[in-house]
């Protein structure tokens, strides 16, 4: 049985530090027994002057949130709820691909742990199950800016590591590493794998832009599916084609036109195997 870090489990935290190959991400690490949302904790510590790389993890969140105002199911002790403080010296308008690049790092980390993850635009990590692909992890990126200047980016990551049960409304859509693998995993191993994968991807993005990371992202992505997206101005339907350098999803509409989707939820029309 795996042993999990908690605020009193200094041994596990030391093991995490020892497993990190990062230079700065996660080198300052706070593990809370409970908080409302690790994203809020990081934003508050950022306002108090925390440095890039701060990682806040929690054993449970009382108001964990996902994209589009959703709640992120955050029961105690089973999963990973973590947020990273980033201070990219880039214009705010260039930052959107970072959500996808975090997804890429999650996919690389899970592949290293011998899973076969697939990425669903923009921020879902899926694993194959007998009932089709289900979500195992999600990313919530939040940013504070002054005009085009970024004060901070908070990159929140939720990974269903050892959850065996989900509320009824999630059960058909969500899975966990343990459900797929058949036994529990050590959260320290999963978190270290993510941080170790993300730092080089992030550094490359800072130095060279999004193109290389996004081309890697495509290798893990579920594309070519017929889908629709509800957005302001109506519903767009087509085949998910690819992502451009801004991180927008391009849908090939029946007219043949490529329609860029900058925000929204992709709904597959046919079952995806
Ligand atoms: C999504 O798929 O909609 C994004 C889910 C992001 C959940 C994580 S858990 C850690 C961090 N704190 C939060 O409140 N949300 C993110």
Image (cartoon, rainbow, N blue to C red):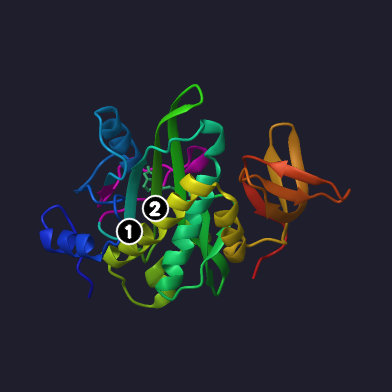
Q: Position of residue 219 (x, y in %)?
A: 60, 65
Q: Residue at position x 32%, y 60% from top?
A: 191
Neighbours of disc 1 within 10 Å: few (<14), some (14-19), many (20+) = many
Q: Residue at position x 29%, y 33% from top?
A: 46
Q: CA distance from mark 1 to mark 2?
A: 8 Å
Instruction: Please tell me whether mark 2 sits on a helix, a strand or a loop.
Output: strand
Q: Position of residue 256 (x, y in %)?
A: 87, 50
Query: Relative to 151, is 227 on the left or the right?
Result: right
Q: Which residue is farthest front?
A: 207
User: What residue is pinned by disc 1?
Assistant: 79
Vertical side of 167 occupied by 145: above or below: above
Q: Residue at position x 45%, y 59% from top?
A: 105
Who comes first in sequence, dot 1 or dot 2? 1
Instruction: Please tell me whether mark 1 sits on a helix, a strand or a loop.
Output: loop
State the extent of the magenta-drawn residues as a range.
Answer: 56-76
Viewer-nearest residue: 7 or 258: 258
Viewer-nearest residue: 159 or 94: 94
- Residue 72 is covered by the magenta coloring: yes
- Residue 64 is covered by the magenta coloring: yes
Asked which quadrant contains residue 192, the reply is bottom left
Vertical side of 175 occupied by 256: above or below: above
Question: Mark 1–mark 2 contact, CB under 8 Å?
Answer: yes
Asked which quadrant contains residue 42, the reply is top left
The numbered mark at residue 158 is 2
Query: Relative to 128, is 64 on the left or the right?
Result: left
Residue 143 visible, this angle: yes
């Amino acid at each position: 049985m795996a042993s999990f870090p908690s605020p009193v489990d200094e041994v596990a935290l030391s093991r995490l530090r020892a497993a990190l190959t990062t230079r700065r991400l996660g080198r300052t690490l706070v593990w809370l027994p409970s908080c409302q949302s690790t994203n809020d904790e990081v934003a508050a510590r950022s306002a108090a002057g925390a440095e890039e790389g701060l990682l806040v993890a929690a054993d449970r969140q009382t108001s964990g949130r996902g994209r589009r105002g959703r709640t992120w199911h955050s029961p105690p002790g089973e999963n990973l709820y973590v947020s990273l403080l980033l201070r990219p010296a880039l214009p705010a308008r260039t930052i959107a691909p970072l959500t996808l690049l975090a997804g890429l790092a999650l996919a690389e980390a899970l592949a290293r742990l011998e899973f076969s993850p697939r990425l669903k635009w923009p921020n879902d990590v899926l694993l194959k199950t007998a009932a089709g692909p289900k979500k195992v992890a999600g990313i919530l990126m939040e940013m504070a800016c002054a005009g085009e200047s970024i004060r901070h980016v908070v990159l929140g990551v939720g990974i269903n590591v050892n959850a065996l049960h989900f509320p009824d409304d999630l059960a058909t859509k969500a899975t966990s590493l343990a459900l797929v693998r058949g036994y529990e995993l050590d959260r320290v191993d999963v978190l270290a794998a993510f941080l170790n994968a993300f730092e080089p991807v992030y550094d490359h993005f800072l130095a060279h832009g999004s193109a290389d990371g996004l081309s890697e992202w495509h290798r893990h992505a579920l594309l070519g599916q017929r889908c629709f997206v509800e957005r302001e101005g109506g519903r767009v339907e087509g085949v998910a084609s690819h992502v451009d350098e801004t991180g927008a999803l391009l849908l090939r509409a029946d007219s043949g036109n490529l329609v860029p989707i900058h925000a929204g939820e992709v709904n597959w029309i046919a079952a995806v195997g």
